[in-house]
Each structure stands twice: as structure tokens, then as C-alpha cells.
Image (cartoon, coloured by chain):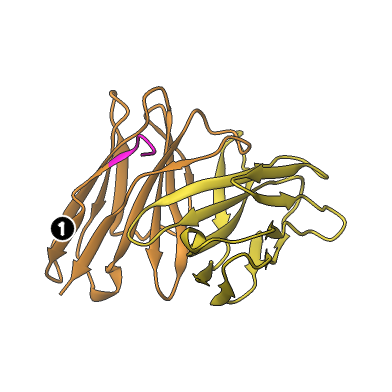
Amino acid sequence: DSGVTQTPKHLITATGQRVTLRCSPRSGDLSVYWYQQSLDQGLQFLIQYYNGEERAKGNILERFSAQQFPDLHSELNLSSLELGDSALYFCASSVDGQPFYEQYFGPGTRLTVT
Amino acid sequence: GDSVTQMEGPVTLSEEAFLTINCTYTATGYPSLFWYVQYPGEGLQLLLKATKADDKGSNKGFEATYRKETTSFHLEKGSVQVSDSAVYFCALSRPLAGGYNKLIFGAGTRLAVHP
């Protein structure tokens, strides 16, 4: 158990809908990262937050947004969903944003868009 | 841009065989290097890491050495077990502007170990 929790585990929704994925980092970790894992794209970095502020952006679509709250949990919002958004979404956390600190991954949320 | 290239899988081995999974990277500066493992139905777990050239990371019998001259970080294990069957990801982390970072992953290599 990494100490990172994600809810829900599974999500099935229709095209055009909006969903929210939730992540709670390990106790004491200030940095949260979101990743998307799909068969065709592999593991892709989406976005990083540090202590409530956005710090780095990767291949995140404009239809997607995220935030980190004062209690350090984070939410990833996916809107106008398309079939291609079906993937595993992972959240990870680390002590801070330095590159030599490992990231601890949650179990993921499997999103299926029908 | 930064990238990580891993040998394609699947890699199929018998129990107690020697394992090598090749990983090479392209990055400016001095990245930190990681191996993560993903067991079926689970999230990624850190297996080992190295933060500077010639560092050797090791854990659970797995080893990898950070070779800057060949930009490689190959994963090895002397004697694999059935329980090592998983997908292995090589990754690098390089500082971005502002001192923050992101992980860049290879495509992953699936390992299947048979009794």
C-alpha cells in the first residue's frame, strides 16, 4: 500500500459527460501528479501541483483540468468526454517537487467512456 | 526532447533464469533514473532508483547502474521468480523551470516467468 488513495476505482460514463477523479496523497507529501495510462499512448504525465499551486503541465487536454485543495487532496476533472479518453488515470505524490524524490502511485481509476 | 526507450516485450523466462531489461534515455543535464513495476491490476511501485552517474540502485534482488557514457539504466536480476511477472517501466526525472519535475516513462516491458 503506497498510502495514496484514489476514488472511484472504476467509472463508466457516456460520451459528452463530465467526471471528477479524486486523489489523496500520502501523509506529508506536498506534490501531486496526474498520469494517464492507455494502450496506445503508454504512461503520459498530465499535470503537477505543489502545495496548492500548479507547477508543471504535460500532455493535458484543454477539456481536462485539475486542482489541489488546502488539505492537499487533488481532483482531476474531465469534460466533454470522448471514447479516446478511456484509460487508467493514476495519481502520484512525493515529498516535494525535486526530481530525485520518488513518486508514490495510487491504485488508479479506470475510466470507460461508452 | 527527453525520452526513454525500453526493450520490447514480452520477455518470457523460466524460473531462476537471468533477467536483463534494457533501458536507454535521452535527456539534457543530469536526470534521476527510476525503475517502476506494475503488477496485474495494481498501480506502479518504485523498484529502485539512481540519482547520479555510476550510482547503482538495488532492491529485492534487482539492480541497475546509471551509466552516463552509454545513457543507459539496464535492469538485471540474477534469478527470477514467478512472482516477478509484471510490467517494468524505466523512467527519468529531470528538473523543470522552477525546480519542479515530471517523470517520463518508457513504454514498459512485460515479463512473464514460468515455473
Nearest the eye: A51 or A80? A51
Instruction: Report in which chain the residue with disc 1 lies.
Output: A
- Tell me where residue A76 appears, x and y as whole percent: 28, 48
Q: Is the residue A36 above or below the residue A25 in the image?
A: below
In the rendered structure, the answer to whether residue B110 lies left or right of residue A30 reads right
What residue do we see at 75% from left, 52% from top?
A: B28
In the rendered structure, the answer to whether residue B17 lies left or right of residue A22 reads right
Q: Is the residue B103 above or below the residue A54 in the image?
A: below
**Magenta span has A104?**
no
Q: How many labels, in total?
A: 1
Nearest the eye: A90 or A48? A90
Secondary structure beneath dot 1 equals loop
**In what quadrant of the picture does the N terminus of chain B appear?**
bottom right
The quadrant holding residue B17 is: bottom right
Identified by mark 1, the residue type is Arg
Nearest the eye: B52 or B59? B59
Where is mark 1, residue-wise?
A18
In the rendered structure, the answer to whether residue A7 lies left or right of residue B81 reads left
Q: Magenta segment range?
A: A1-5
Chain that is yellow in the image: B
List the single residue furthest toward the right.
Answer: B69
Q: Is the residue A82 above or below the residue B35 in the image?
A: below
- Tell me where residue A79 appears, x and y as whole percent: 21, 59
- Tell me where residue A80 appears, x and y as whole percent: 19, 65
- Tell me where residue B114 appears, x and y as whole percent: 50, 73
For label 1, count other residues whose C-alpha is less than 10 Å away and answer few (under 14), some (14-19) or many (20+). some
What residue do we see at 64% from left, 73% from top?
A: B7
In the rendered structure, the answer to whether residue A65 lies left or right of residue A46 reads left
What is the chief secondary structure element of the magenta stretch?
loop
From the image, state the color of chain A.
orange
What residue do we see at 53% from left, 52% from top?
A: B36
